[in-house]
Image (spheres, coloured by chain):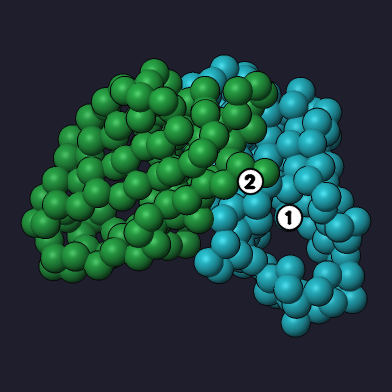
Chain colours: A cyan, B green
Amino acid sequence: ETGVTQTPRHLVMGMTNKKSLKCEQHLGHNAMYWYKQSAKKPLELMFVYSLEERVENNSVPSRFSPECPNSSHLFLHLHTLQPEDSALYLCASSLGTAVDTGYTFGSGTRLTVV
Amino acid sequence: TQLLEQSPQFLSIQEGENLTVYCNSSSVFSSLQWYRQEPGEGPVLLVTVVTGGEVKKLKRLTFQFGDARKDSSLHITAAQPGDTGLYLCAPRKEYGNKLVFGAGTILRVKS
């Protein structure tokens, strides 16, 4: 248990479904992130929230919609996904923006789009 | 876009052997972190290096940040099966809190 909890751990969804991934941290961190991890590819940063405000969106398709209702919770809403969106989706949090700040990751949600 | 290369991509060794993995770039970084990711889990922070030439030790793991802060290495002495995992280097840009992750080195230590 890292202090960052992601649910569900596994998700299988059809291309016409709507689902949401949830991330929760009670570490007192003020920044939260969504990453996508596909096989044989580097971690891809999707979204960054700092103090509940989205500060970065790395050209992510609109079928992915993040939400950060408060500093402890982060959601990723999914709709009309494609099979190539199947991947491990990782949430992370951090405290501050100092150069030595580390990220705490959740265990991820393994998403399969059929 | 900065080019970040980790090598080797995959390494399979016997228990007790030593190994070194590398993280190289043409860019200068303000700091660099190493993470280990085990199957089915998220990455876990191992170390942060900030100063050029800095060396940090974590039990059997030795981390070094290049003098020019463009590269880093991780050396493991007497590898154990528990060291098996994906080792990711993550340098940080000069400004902001954004980490860039390399593709990683997959290490498998056989008993």
- The quarter of the rendered structure image containing the N terminus of chain B is top right
Indicate the position of residue A94 as horizontal and vertical percent values: 59, 29
Identify residue for label 1.
A21
As drawn, A64 above or below B108 = above
Residue A63 lies in quadrant: bottom right
Judged from the image, the secondary structure of the residue bearing numbered disc 1 is strand
Other residues around mark 2 within 10 Å, as few (<14) / some (14–19) / many (≥20)? many
Q: Relative to residue B56, is residue A85 drawn left or right?
A: right
Say which amino acid is labelled 2. Answer: Cys
Task: Please state which of the two labelled residues, at mark 1 or mark 2, is closer to the viewer.
Answer: 2
Indicate the position of residue A110 as horizontal and vertical percent values: 61, 65
* Residue B36 is at least partly visible in this image: no
Nearest the eye: A56 or B39: A56
Identify residue for label 2.
A91
Residue A83 lies in quadrant: bottom right
Asked if marks 1 and 2 touch (Cβ < 8 Å), the reply is yes
* Residue A113 is at least partly visible in this image: yes
Nearest the eye: A98 or B71: B71
Indicate the position of residue B109 as horizontal and vertical percent values: 21, 63
Q: Relative to residue A101, is residue A71 drawn left or right?
A: right
As drawn, B19 above or below A79 = above
